[in-house]
Image: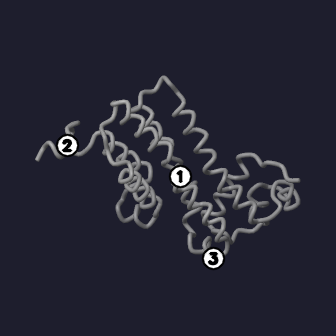
Amino acid sequence: MTHEPDRQVYLKLLRLMGIKGTHFTTDDLARELGTSKRTLYVYFASKEEMIGKTIDFVFEDMKRSDSEILANTDYSPREKIERYFRNIPDSYHIGALLRHEGDFRRHYPQLWEKTERRLDAIWDELIELVEQGIASGTLRKVDTAVLRLMLEQTLFKLLDYEYTARARVSFESGMQAMCDILLHGLLGTSAPVSSLR
């Protein structure tokens, strides 16, 4: 029976995965942690389990803090949306999982599918919050299927290091810009586009 490792172990795993993809070794991780390989097997039964639990760590950590935001009744819908955007983990955490996508797909296809499923679900609670705001009249009606598509594609682009280098935009500034555009729009008015034609 394995034990649950502390946060530092997962952060070291993410660092190694960001550099080497799935080609990191247990020796690499033991060196990073200053421990023995034998100690690692107290936490993980296999390398595949190391990767799988690291995927869970990234997304569960985010989901836990998202839930705290959404459950806080002191925040208005607008404040919740703003905080939700700021709570998306920095590019290093998710980027470490995505940077070596081809290698991931070849060697651990089931774990890659798991990563994709978790990525697809990132925006679920935000979309639900928007739909609640629309229903209550605090947010204007929008097509949430299109909103989800915009969010998903923007996130993938901002996690593409080649793209952000070419565009000279950081993950953090890109997320903030997306939040500003969604909350304030392009026209600086709450009037729907159809009424301005």
At horizontal 64% and vertical 69% (from top left) the residue drawn is 20
Residue 48 appears at what percent x and percent y?
A: 74, 65
In contact (CB < 8 Å): disc 1 and disc 2: no
Dot 1: few (<14), some (14–19), or many (≥20) neighbours within 10 Å? few
Is residue 95 toward the left or the right of residue 138 in the image? Answer: right
Residue 33 appears at what percent x and percent y?
A: 76, 55
At horizontal 42% and vertical 35% (from top left) the residue drawn is 132
Residue 7 appears at what percent x and percent y?
A: 71, 46
Q: Quadrant of residue 79?
A: top left
At horizontal 62% and vertical 44% (from top left) the residue drawn is 61
Residue type highlighted by circle 1: Ala
Is residue 191 toward the left or the right of residue 17 in the image? Answer: left
Q: Which residue is mark 1?
A: 121
Q: Which residue is mark 3?
A: 106
Q: Secondary structure at mark 2?
A: loop
- Vertically, is 143 above or below 37? above
Is residue 59 toward the left or the right of residue 30 in the image? Answer: left
Q: Which residue is mark 2?
A: 187
Q: Which tag, 3 or 2, sits closer to the chain's start?
A: 3
Residue type highlighted by circle 2: Leu
Q: Which tag, 3 or 1, sits closer to the chain's start?
A: 3
